[in-house]
Amino acid sequence: MHIPTPTPSNAARSPFHKRSVCVTGGAGFIGSHMCRRLLIEGARVTCLDNLDTGRHANIGKLEELPGFTFVHHDINDALPPALPAFEYIFNLACPASPIHYQRDPVYTALTCSRGVYNLLERAHRDGATILHASTSEIYGDPQVHPQPETYWGNVNTCGPRSCYDEGKRFAETLLRDYGARYGVTVRLARIFNTYGPHMQFDDGRVVSNFVIQALKGEPLTVYGDGSQTRSFCYVDDLVEGLLRLAASRTAGANPVNLGNPEEFKVAELAQLVLAATQSHSNIVHQPLPQDDPKRRRPDISRAKAILGWAPTTPLTAGLLKTIAEFRQRLEMPAPRKTAMRSAAELQAFQ
Ligand code: NAD
Ligand code: UDP
């Protein structure tokens, strides 16, 4: 299904127009872009977030809009009954970077299990479609490359990444089984490394670390020899894929990889960031974290076939946008709240 580029004039043709949509984790990095895009599509958006790793500043401007509501809520608790009935639930709530999800591994595992169960109960009650943000981490340190959805993965159940990897694996099982048992429409997106504006400065991820380090003139910290690879997807491309998957009538509950199949060594990324920031920072090497996957690249054949989706933003272009927003946040004081009335104004907002 094709979702046209959102403009105020074609929002009425969007499958999300006038729909009641819940975005859990909506104050986080991806969630805030999802909320903004859904508003452009004409949806009524309820953002649920406990601000564990999210930032109120990510959604501050959206709160001025009539179609947007923020509710401070932890999905480990049942959803407040007073909320409106939802037609779609996008579950993005979960700490996502290694330092965040390892900070309280029990909380991470519960958010992926009890939290997901609470959302399924709500989706059942409301007759909502639920799209869940799964992850390439379910493939662990993969022995098949690139990774198709049919690959079962290579995951350590007792390591520092297990709370997240196994949590997300369990969530996929729970969502599929609950959907089949109770007739809830489930969509599973396996998201690969995504980057862009609104990433947290201190999330420890490679793109945010390198950009901050380069902008501050500090050494870029390459873990190991930098030969490990990742494939980086710009956030706008990802959000487009998530919307298409949620609206798809054919995807079923089968997982769909969403990511950019262009693969880079971490050492190459460091050079790209140095060039894009025009920084004179050095590179230092630090130990590779335990169980760090050596290679990762999505096979997106399924997304192409079912959704007609593929990313369109080259890494260099996405890095420039990310760097510009990071620069703004570093150099300027927190922006004052400004009223935004039209979708056209909203499109200009990052
Ligand atoms: P993020 O940390 O910026 O956003 C997560 C949001 O969820 C935050 O706003 C946080 O406060 C909120 N949250 C966490 N636990 C919660 C809870 N129990 N109840 C309510 N809110 C809660 O991370 P992100 O990068 O935006 O990731 C969003 C989703 O996408 C996550 O589920 C993550 O696992 C998945 N994902 C992200 C990537 C990536 O590269 N960014 C890759 C694969 C999967
Ligand atoms: N990495 C790095 N320097 C950093 C942060 C991360 O070299 O400052 C490496 C990390 O070891 C991994 C890759 O970059 O090999 C991606 O790390 P990230 O935490 O962004 O994502 P994930 O490991 O979850 O894919």
Image (cartoon, helix red, strand yellow):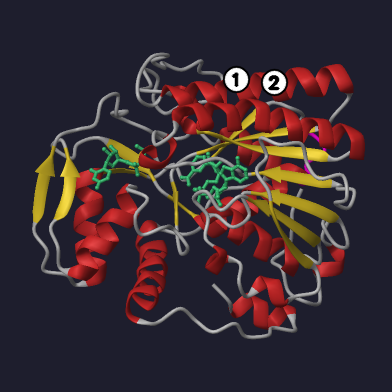
Q: Identify the disc placed on residue 214.
A: none
Magenta residues, dominant SS class? loop
For residue 170, the mark is: 1
Image-quadrant location for residue 13:
bottom right
Front position in the image: 309 or 106: 106
Residue 149 shows in this picture: no
- State the extent of the magenta-drawn residues as a range: 247-251
- Rounded to the nearest whole Å, what is the CA distance between mark 2 and mark 1? 6 Å
The residue under the point 36% across, 63% down is 319
Is 207 displayed left or right of 89 in the figure?
left
Q: Quadrant of ligand 2?
A: top left
Give the quarter of the image for residue 275. Answer: bottom left
Specify few, some or many for label 2: CA neighbours under 10 Å numbering under 14, 14-19, or 20 or more. Answer: some
- Mark 1: which secondary structure? helix
If the image is split into quadrants, where does the C terminus sit?
bottom right
Pick the residue in front: 167 or 190. 167
Question: Residue beneath label 2, please?
Answer: 174
Instruction: Look at the numbered discs 2 and 1 and tell me whether their residues touch, using CB distance below 8 Å.
Output: yes
- Amino acid at pointer 2: Leu
